């Protein structure tokens, strides 16, 4: 029993020992777990504190960044505001420019419409409508329309004469650089109309006008220096002014590269068509149209020429011109053939530019010995139109035409020798042909003669002769010579201006007193008749031509009547 009990005791001891060991292990594990838990919590706390610190830092950084961002945004807004302000200003300026452009364009359109109406108008009412358009265009700042209105106020067009208002408008235009206004102010100052009589001031106005490109001012200054009016007489200065005008006109003529205008003279001269009358009577025109339709070749060519350039009151009508020329050419007229060639050489709505057709008709005319046709062929070869440039052929045709007395061909020969085009330069021959052409009034020939005298090319230099030649060439081009102190060609009737000019004429020459007296008598009589006889109840003055009512010599009749009354009164006084 003892061994068994001993074994049981041993087992109990072992069990207790095992439990003790297990309990110790359990305690040890619990301790380890507690230690691990404690470490983890502390780490977490430290981690959390770090996170909080980082968050604080991040918040601080974010605040700083937000502040910086806010400042940036404010700066951007400020810049944007400045940009917006600039953009607004730009938009405003652009809008102003657009508005101004619209006004300018509208003003230009109104002015062009006014000009068109004025050119086509035949009645006083239509012309008044044109000036209404000019007035509207003036309100929109159109300078050309303002010039028209100033002229109307000065000249009294359509009963609206107001010299003071005209001067104010001219002065405003002068500030804008209008040379026409400078011209007008110079004229008014030189004559003492509406402003102080002041030749020195007039000279200044004309000088500014010439600097602005006014050919009229150039001519006035040329005349003043040539005649010594308010300046020291100086032919060279006068020559320089006239030269500028002559150069301008010659340049325009030479650029046409065709037959100068003067060639369109009436080559075949029915009595009434070649007269000096500016206007062809309507009934006579109808009669000539009847004759042309009946086959009168001479009349056909003449009517063709008149319609070609628009002379004697007839409108320029290329279709009618070509119609009459073709009828005459079909009947064998060499002149008509030549003019058809000219029309195709220059080109127009009725005869589009065609060098081949021009060559055809010029050749047809030249084969008949026609000078215009020969000259036309010379031009084609000289300028290389439709054919290669051939100076030898051009010279041949020009010589043939010149021998027949055609002035334009004579000029072309002179130019070839002057410029050395296809020939050796020969100033003596150039002078010869220029002189021959000038005798028929060829303007470019006169211009080149003046140029030769001015520079002493081929002739002895002569300032006076050069000036006279230039004046002659300008007169041939129908340029108006404004005499700044003795008179002016004006399209209106102004009693005060007439009185002023007559007084100046009387002061200039003692011999003018008697003619001036009679002229003033006529002037005052006219004024009296207008005031007494032709006043109507609408408070407007109507002017009737006394030539038609009392005859062409009514003024002599009135002067004679006044003289008779004076003699009668003087005789009764001494009886």
Image: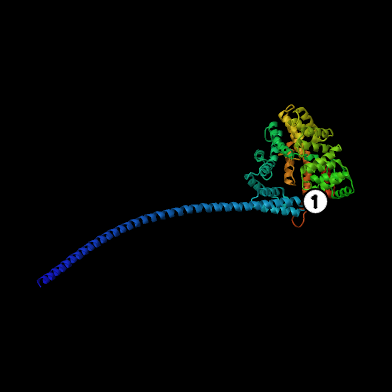
Q: Is residue 441 visible?
A: no
Q: Position of residue 89 (x, y in %)?
A: 53, 52
**Which residue lies at the image location 70% right of the left edge and 31% below the top edge?**
235
Could you tell whether 451 is left or right of 403 in the image? left
Q: How many marks on residues?
A: 1
Q: Secondary structure at mark 1?
A: loop
- Work out whether residue 226 or residue 390 is closer to the camera in this orientation and state it: 390
> Where is mark 1, residue-wise?
544
- Work out whether residue 285 or residue 327 is closer to the camera in this orientation and state it: 327
Classed neighbour count for the residue bearing mark 1: other residues with Cα under 10 Å, few (<14), some (14–19), many (≥20): few
Q: Position of residue 547 (x, y in %)?
A: 83, 48
Q: Position of residue 31 (x, y in %)?
A: 21, 63
| Location of residue 126 with respect to 459 vertically, above or below | below
| Location of residue 65 with respect to 262 vertically, above or below | below
- Work out whether residue 165 or residue 20 is closer to the camera in this orientation and state it: 20
Image quarter of residue 563: top right
Quarter of the rendering occupied by the C terminus: top right
Quarter of the rendering occupied by the N terminus: bottom left
Could you tell whether 11 is left or right of 376 in the image? left
**Which residue lies at the image location 74% right of the left edge and 51% below the top edge?**
118
The colour scheme is rainbow
In the current view of this chain or complex, which residue is farthest to the top?
A: 460
- Work out whether residue 543 or residue 537 is closer to the camera in this orientation and state it: 543
Q: Position of residue 64 (x, y in %)?
A: 37, 54
Q: Is residue 172 visible?
A: yes
In the current view of this chain or complex, which residue is farthest to the left?
A: 2
């Amino acid at each position: 029993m003892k061994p068994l009990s001993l074994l049981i005791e041993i087992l109990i001891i072992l069990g207790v020992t095992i439990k003790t060991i297990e309990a110790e292990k359990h305690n040890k594990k619990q301790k380890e777990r507690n230690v691990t838990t404690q470490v983890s919590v502390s780490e977490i706390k430290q981690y959390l504190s770090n996170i909080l610190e980082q968050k604080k830092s991040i918040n601080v950084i974010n605040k700083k960044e937000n502040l910086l961002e806010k400042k940036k945004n404010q700066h951007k807004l400020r810049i944007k505001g400045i940009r917006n302000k600039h953009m607004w200003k730009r938009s405003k300026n652009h809008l102003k420019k657009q508005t101004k452009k619209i006004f300018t364009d509208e003003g230009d359109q109104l002015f062009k419409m006014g000009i068109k109406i004025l050119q086509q108008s035949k009645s006083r009412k239509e012309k008044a409508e044109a000036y209404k358009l000019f007035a509207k265009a003036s309100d929109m700042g159109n300078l050309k329309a303002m010039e028209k209105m100033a002229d109307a106020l000065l000249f009294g067009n359509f009963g609206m004469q107001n010299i003071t208002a005209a001067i104010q408008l001219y002065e405003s235009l002068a500030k804008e650089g209008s040379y026409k206004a400078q011209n007008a102010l110079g004229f008014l100052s030189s004559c003492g109309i509406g402003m102080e009589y002041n030749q020195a001031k007039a000279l200044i106005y004309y000088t500014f006008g010439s600097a602005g490109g006014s050919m009229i001012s150039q001519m006035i200054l040329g005349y003043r220096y040539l005649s010594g009016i308010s300046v020291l007489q100086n032919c060279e200065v006068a020559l320089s002014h006239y030269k500028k005008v002559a150069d301008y006109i010659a340049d325009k003529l030479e650029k046409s590269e065709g037959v100068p205008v003067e060639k369109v003279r009436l080559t075949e001269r029915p009595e009434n068509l070649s007269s000096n009358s500016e206007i062809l009577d309507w009934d006579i025109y109808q009669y000539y149209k009847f004759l042309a339709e009946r086959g009168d070749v001479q009349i056909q060519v003449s009517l063709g020429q008149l319609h070609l350039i628009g002379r004697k009151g007839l409108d320029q009508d290329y279709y009618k011109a070509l119609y009459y020329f073709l009828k005459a050419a079909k009947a064998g007229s060499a002149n008509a053939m030549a003019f058809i060639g000219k029309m195709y050489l220059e080109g127009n709505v009725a005869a589009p530019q065609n060098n081949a057709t021009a060559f055809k008709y010029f050749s047809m005319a030249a084969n008949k010995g026609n000078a215009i046709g020969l000259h036309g062929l010379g031009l084609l070869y000289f300028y290389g139109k439709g054919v290669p440039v051939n100076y030898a052929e051009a010279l041949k045709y020009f010589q043939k035409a010149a021998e027949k007395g055609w002035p334009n061909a004579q000029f072309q020969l002179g130019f070839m020798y002057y410029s050395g085009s296809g020939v050796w330069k020969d100033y003596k021959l150039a002078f010869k042909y220029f002189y021959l052409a000038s005798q028929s009034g060829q303007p470019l020939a006169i211009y080149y003669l003046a140029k030769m005298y001015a520079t002493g090319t081929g002739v002895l230099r002569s300032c006076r002769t050069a000036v006279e030649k230039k004046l002659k060439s300008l007169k041939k081009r129908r340029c108006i010579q404004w005499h700044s102190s003795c008179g002016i060609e004006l399209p209106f009737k102004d009693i005060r201006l007439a009185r002023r000019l007559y007084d100046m004429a009387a002061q200039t020459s003692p011999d003018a007193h008697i003619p001036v007296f009679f002229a003033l008598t006529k002037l005052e009589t006219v004024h009296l008749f207008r005031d007494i006889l032709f006043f109507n109840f609408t408070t407007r003055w109507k002017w009737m031509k006394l030539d038609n009512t009392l005859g062409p010599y009514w003024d002599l009749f009135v002067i004679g009547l006044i003289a008779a009354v004076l003699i009668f009164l003087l005789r009764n006084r001494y009886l």
